[in-house]
């Protein structure tokens, strides 16, 4: 079983602290067995005060970090000095030093400040809550900060933006470990959207449309039913009854990405599901997902996931089972159990 340690720090936000337990706790194999063991720990094993006015105990101390396959650091509001260049408290620095090399390390929201202060983000691309981005950039100039995205997967170190983006990142990890079907089921049990691409923009001071203003919502729903068809910008704009320029601008305001980026992401989800749950040839998967050709699907999957469709299928089809050293999508963990797809 994959071991997840969630590090609770003084001033931790309770919602984000409990989020990994809820999301990973809903990731199950076909037989209903749990795929993750989640443990909450503190740097010294003692209780910590939350930012909500109550104190929580802990199930473990730093030994949980040393045994973990994945370490998650939720946000804390009790260490503002990190953004002023102050070092980590000694007890926290010692606890982080217990993490084994190669352990997947994850931050939610301002938990990225802890990773940055520990030097774990130096030379890497990372994100944080957009409100803290200017101060973060000044405090940690060696980090390549991208505050416009929901989360960043940089291999064994992953960072997410505020609150709900942490849910997106947890589901992304489940998807990378066990495939789309398991992640989608976990999302349904949590009653949250199963997928928002990490490259989707954070919701930064976007105006709410007037109630009478036309939106692209209906067109997006219409397009999801026709992903296998050619969907040009002109056709989408015509369905929305907008000019091409107005449609493109409004789509980006509402979805946080361009129509082409959105379509590509949705088609990749269809392709991933078909590769996991069917024996369809790659060229037919490409056609049904709307990519037109197997070559186009290969290019998009290599760009987004770092693997070919065939390698992706080998990773997540239990009949074959991934062989040692076999290619996995970016972020996937070697040695994780491979459940049969649910659908």
Image: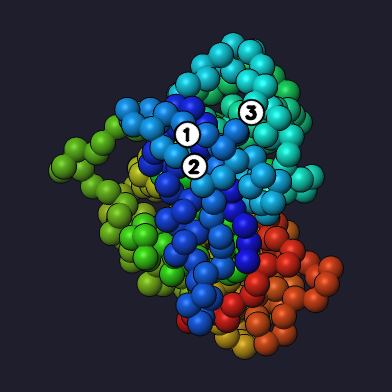
Mark 2, residue position:
58
Q: How is the image coloured?
A: rainbow
Mark 1, residue position:
47
Residue 115 position within the rendered picture, expressed as x and y whole percent measured from the top left: 65, 32
Q: Secondary structure at mark 3?
A: helix
Q: Secondary structure at mark 2?
A: loop
- 112 over 248 or under it: above or below: above
- Separation of residues labelled 1 and 2 (CA atoms): 6 Å
Of residues 198 and 170, the one nearer the viewer is 170
Name the residue at 51% across, 82% down.
Answer: 31
Residue 116 position within the rendered picture, expressed as x and y whole percent measured from the top left: 66, 27
Question: Dot 1, crowdedness within 10 Å: few (<14), some or many (≥20)?
Answer: some
Which residue extends farthest left?
212
The N terminus sits in image quarter:
bottom right
Mark 3, residue position:
92
- Separation of residues labelled 1 and 3 (CA atoms): 14 Å
Looking at the image, tell me whether mark 2 or mark 3 is earlier in sequence order: 2
């Amino acid at each position: 079983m994959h071991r997840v340690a969630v590090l609770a720090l003084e001033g931790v936000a309770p919602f984000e602290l409990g989020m990994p337990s809820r999301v990973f706790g809903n990731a199950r194999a076909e037989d209903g067995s749990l795929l993750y063991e989640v443990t909450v720990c503190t740097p010294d094993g003692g209780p910590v005060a939350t930012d909500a006015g109550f104190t929580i105990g802990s199930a473990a101390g730093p030994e949980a970090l040393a045994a973990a396959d994945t370490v998650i650091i939720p946000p804390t509001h009790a260490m503002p000095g990190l953004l002023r260049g102050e070092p980590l408290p000694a007890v926290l620095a010692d606890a982080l030093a217990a993490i084994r090399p190669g352990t997947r390390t994850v931050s939610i929201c301002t938990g990225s400040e802890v990773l940055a202060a520990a030097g774990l983000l130096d030379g890497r691309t990372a994100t944080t809550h957009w409100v803290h981005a200017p101060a973060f950039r000044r405090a940690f100039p060696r980090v390549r900060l991208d505050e416009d995205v929901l989360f960043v997967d940089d291999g064994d170190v992953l960072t997410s933006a505020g609150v709900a983006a942490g849910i997106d990142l947890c589901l992304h990890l489940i998807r990378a470990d066990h495939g789309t079907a398991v992640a989608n089921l976990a999302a349904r049990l949590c009653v949250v959207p199963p997928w928002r691409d990490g490259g989707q923009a954070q919701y930064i001071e976007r105006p709410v449309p007037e109630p009478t203003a036309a939106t692209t919502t209906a067109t997006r729903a219409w397009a999801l039913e026709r992903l296998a068809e050619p969907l040009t910008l002109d056709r989408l704009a015509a369905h929305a009854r907008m000019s091409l320029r107005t449609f493109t601008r409004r789509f980006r305001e509402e979805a946080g990405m361009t129509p082409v980026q959105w379509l590509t992401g949705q088609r990749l989800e269809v392709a991933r599901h078909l590769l996991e749950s069917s024996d369809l040839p790659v060229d037919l998967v490409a056609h049904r997902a709307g990519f037109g050709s197997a070559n186009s699907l290969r290019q998009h999957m290599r760009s987004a996931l770092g693997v070919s469709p065939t390698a992706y299928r080998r990773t997540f089809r239990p009949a074959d089972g991934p062989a040692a050293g076999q290619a996995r999508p970016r972020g996937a963990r070697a040695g994780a159990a491979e459940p049969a797809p649910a659908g």
